[in-house]
Amino acid sequence: MSALTKASGALKSVDYEVFGRVQGVCFRMYTEEEARKLGVVGWVKNTSKGTVTGQVQGPEDKVNAMKSWLSKVGSPSSRIDRTNFSNEKEISKLDFSGFSTRY
């Protein structure tokens, strides 16, 4: 375990789905940008039902910051109606090396 991981406490993983006007408004691009800024890993993708879904992993405080961004901020022209978080759990190591957009 790296010193970075130890210093910031437990690693968390959480799945998310964002509802509202989140497709066609660069939501995935901004999500990827925000994740990289915060230093969390995972992925984001559009769903066939007009939502955006994905997974975030990283130190608990950074995952919480990303959850807040996904619930309240989003991309400049998006409108977030609600965000569902599920499968939140503590993990021993990260499953991803970066943050990517899936298709």
Image: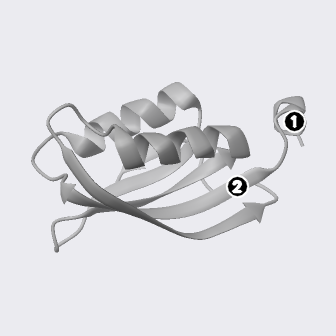
Q: Residue at x 60, y 45 (%)?
A: 64
Neighbour class for label 2 at 10 Å: few (<14), some, many (≥20)? many
Measure the C-alpha gap from mark 1 to mark 2: 15 Å
Please state which amino acid type lies under the numbered disc 1.
Answer: Ser
Q: Nearer the viewer, mark 1 or mark 2?
A: 2
Residue in the foreground of this view, choosing between 54 and 17: 17
Please report whichever mark, 1 or 2, sits nearer to the chain's N-terminal start. 1
Q: Is residue 73 visible?
A: yes
Toward the left, the furthest residue is: 24
Q: Is residue 79 left or right of residue 68?
A: left
- Is the residue 63 above or below the residue 103 in the image? above
Kindly state the secondary structure of the residue where label 2 is placed.
strand
Kindly state the secondary structure of the residue where label 1 is placed.
loop
Q: How is the image coloured?
A: one colour
Q: Position of residue 57 (x, y in %)?
A: 61, 51
Q: Is residue 82 left or right of residue 48?
A: right
Give the residue at mark 1: 2
Q: Position of residue 20 (x, y in %)?
A: 19, 58
Q: Is residue 36 left or right of residue 80?
A: right
Q: Quadrant of the C terminus?
A: bottom left
Q: Are marks 1 and 2 in contact (CB under 8 Å)?
A: no
Q: Quadrant of the N terminus?
A: top right
Give the residue at mark 2: 12
Q: Residue at x 25, y 36 (%)?
A: 75
Please state which amino acid type lies under the numbered disc 2.
Answer: Lys
Q: Position of residue 67 (x, y in %)?
A: 50, 48
Q: Is residue 102 visible?
A: no
Toward the top, the furthest residue is: 37
Q: Residue at x 20, y 31 (%)?
A: 76
